[in-house]
Image: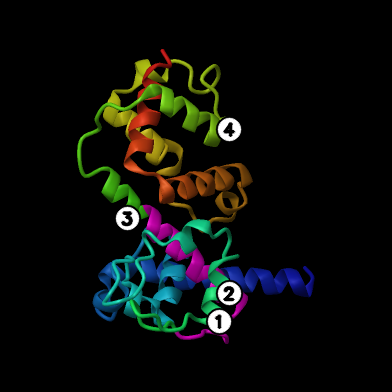
Amino acid sequence: MNIQSLFTLCLLTGVVLLTVDSVSAQSRADYDYAFIGDPLPDPLMQLNKETYVLYGCAYCHGINLAPVGEAADLRTSPIVAADVNANVIEPVLRNGIPQTPKSSPMPQFSDLSEREIQSIAAYIHYARAQARYEDLTKEPASAGDPVAGGIYFEQHCVSCHSGRRDLEGIGNRYDVNALREEVLVPARFRTPASFKLDRRNDTEVNAGRAKHQALLENYTEPNIKNIVAYLQTLK
């Protein structure tokens, strides 16, 4: 084993031990629920969350992105909506945002490492998707426009899915609420991502999970109603 491989193995082992310890925090008296919030089922996302909290982001933007005071609401932020792999979030973190008539200033975090910025951005996207899911499932599913849903499907889904292949007959297999659940979080992605290397190296599943999370972050209620109405036509 060369030096680089040994270093990578040690780093991964350290992350696994740290994050597994974090996720098992329910049984620890020294885990600060008020400061960090409930542990997440995915240990590496828990590490991202702790980075977000420990660098002070939660102080203004909230642990679960419910903002405190005048801070921007990251659940609806167009900056976050436009971000891919921290390409928009990174310059905001490094440069800060000056005070405006409607909001307080955001400080610079120019000393953050690239890994820390990636962790913060990953947690923001995760928490944003979770918040969107909760908003979109507060009420039972209702009727939408299948034509509009078909247009949305063509624009966002056909690179991976087809009504003639994997989704053929889906309208017969699920009721409207189950269809909505499949659109929001497909069954194959409901199990939390694992820190095990075989899971982390499954590029197909990871790409699909990331794509669906990005869609979930930005779905509107009409989007979901219309997609579900379209899927109901696939008999």
Q: Which of the two labelled residues, at mark 4 and mark 2, occupies the earlier sequence position?
A: 2
| Residue 57 location, quadrant | bottom left
Disc 4 residue type (three-letter): Cys
Disc 1 crowd rating (10 Å Cα; few below 14, some 14-19, many 20+) is: few
Q: Nearer the viewer, mark 1 or mark 4?
A: 1
Disc 3 crowd rating (10 Å Cα; few below 14, some 14-19, many 20+) is: some
Measure the C-alpha gap from mark 4 to mark 2: 32 Å
Q: Which of the two labelled residues, at mark 3 and mark 1, occupies the earlier sequence position?
A: 1
Measure the C-alpha gap from mark 3 to mark 2: 24 Å
Range shown magenta:
107-129
Disc 2 crowd rating (10 Å Cα; few below 14, some 14-19, many 20+) is: some
Q: What element carries label 3?
A: helix
Which residue is under mark 3?
131
Q: Which of the two labelled residues, at mark 1 and mark 4, occupies the earlier sequence position?
A: 1
Which residue is under mark 4?
160
Measure the C-alpha gap from mark 3 to mark 1: 27 Å
Disc 2 residue type (three-letter): Pro
Furthest residue in direction front, as rendered: 101
Q: What element carries label 2?
A: helix
Q: Nearer the viewer, mark 4 or mark 2?
A: 2
Q: Where is residue 157 in the image (x, y as percent from the top left)?
A: 53, 33
Specify whether residue 111 is painted magenta. yes
Q: Position of residue 90 (x, y in %)?
A: 57, 72
Name the chief secondary structure element in magenta.
helix
Disc 1 residue type (three-letter): Asn
Q: Which of the two labelled residues, at mark 3 and mark 4, occupies the earlier sequence position?
A: 3
Q: Nearer the viewer, mark 3 or mark 2?
A: 2
Disc 4 crowd rating (10 Å Cα; few below 14, some 14-19, many 20+) is: few
Which residue is under mark 2?
91
